[in-house]
């Protein structure tokens, strides 16, 4: 059974930083793309960032490039999202998610698995 457990959300002022963590289990960690999507009230789901541990390939949404960094610790089956220079428009529930193929990430398809989500709120 695939399990994804997020942590690290919270309230931060604009310009601040947060680091999200996602502990994964139930699948071979480096076979899939793992990362984050977010959803704000009244807005569509947005793929934020993904990483494929087998070759280090990464994906970032244009809205977060240069501000967010994704990384993985294969020994711990954990993925991290370092979020710097946060803006109020980054406010959303962030979900750890898994895509079984990289093509699915690029085509912005629905993830195959996702966690419960963690709230990130950026105040102005």
Image (cartoon, grey):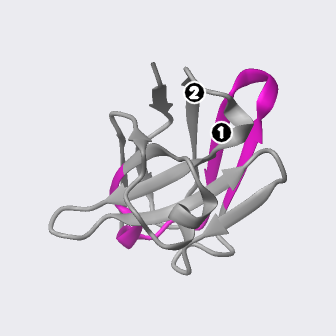
How dense is the environment of label 2, judged by Cα within 10 Å: few (below 14), some, or many (20 and up)?
Answer: many
Q: Nearer the viewer, mark 1 or mark 2?
A: 2
Is 76 placed left or right of 120 in the picture?
right
Q: Quadrant of residue 105?
A: bottom right
Q: Residue 34, relative to residue 16: is it above or below?
A: above
State yes or no: residue 63 in magenta.
Answer: no
Magenta stretch, residue numbers: 69-93
Which callout, 1 or 2, points at the residue further toward the start of the chain?
Answer: 2
Is 94 placed left or right of 84 in the picture?
left
Tags 1 and 2 touching, CB below 8 Å = yes
Question: What is the total number of numbered labels drawn onto the structure image?
Answer: 2
Q: Residue furthest bottom?
A: 62
Q: Residue 29, relative to residue 67: is it above or below?
A: above
Quadrant of the image for the N terminus? top left
Q: Which mark is residue 9?
A: none
Is 69 placed left or right of 109 in the picture?
right
Separation (CA) of disc 1 from disc 2:
8 Å
Q: Residue at x 15, y 68 (%)?
A: 42
Q: Quadrant of residue 113?
A: top left
Q: Residue 4, image x and y in percent?
A: 47, 29
Identify the residue under disc 2.
24
Mark 2 lies on a secondary structure that is strand
Q: Residue at x 67, y 28 (%)?
A: 28
Q: Residue 33, image x and y in percent?
A: 62, 49
Q: Residue at x 65, y 42 (%)?
A: 80
**Residue 76 or residue 30, whichever sits in front:** 30
Q: Quadrant of residue 58?
A: bottom right
**Residue 48 or residue 16, whichever sits in front:** 48
Q: Residue at x 65, y 66 (%)?
A: 59
Identify the residue under disc 1.
79
């Amino acid at each position: 059974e695939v399990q994804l457990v997020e942590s690290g959300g919270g309230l931060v002022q604009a310009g601040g930083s947060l680091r999200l963590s996602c502990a994964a289990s139930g699948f071979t960690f480096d076979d899939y793309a793992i990362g984050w999507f977010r959803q704000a009230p009244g807005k569509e789901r947005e793929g934020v960032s993904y990483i494929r541990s087998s070759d280090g390939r990464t994906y970032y949404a244009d809205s977060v490039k240069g501000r967010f960094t994704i990384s993985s610790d294969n020994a711990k089956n954990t993925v991290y999202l370092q979020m710097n220079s946060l803006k109020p428009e980054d406010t959303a529930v962030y979900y750890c998610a898994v895509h079984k193929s990289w093509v699915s990430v690029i085509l912005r398809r629905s993830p195959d698995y996702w966690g419960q989500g963690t709230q990130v709120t950026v105040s102005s």
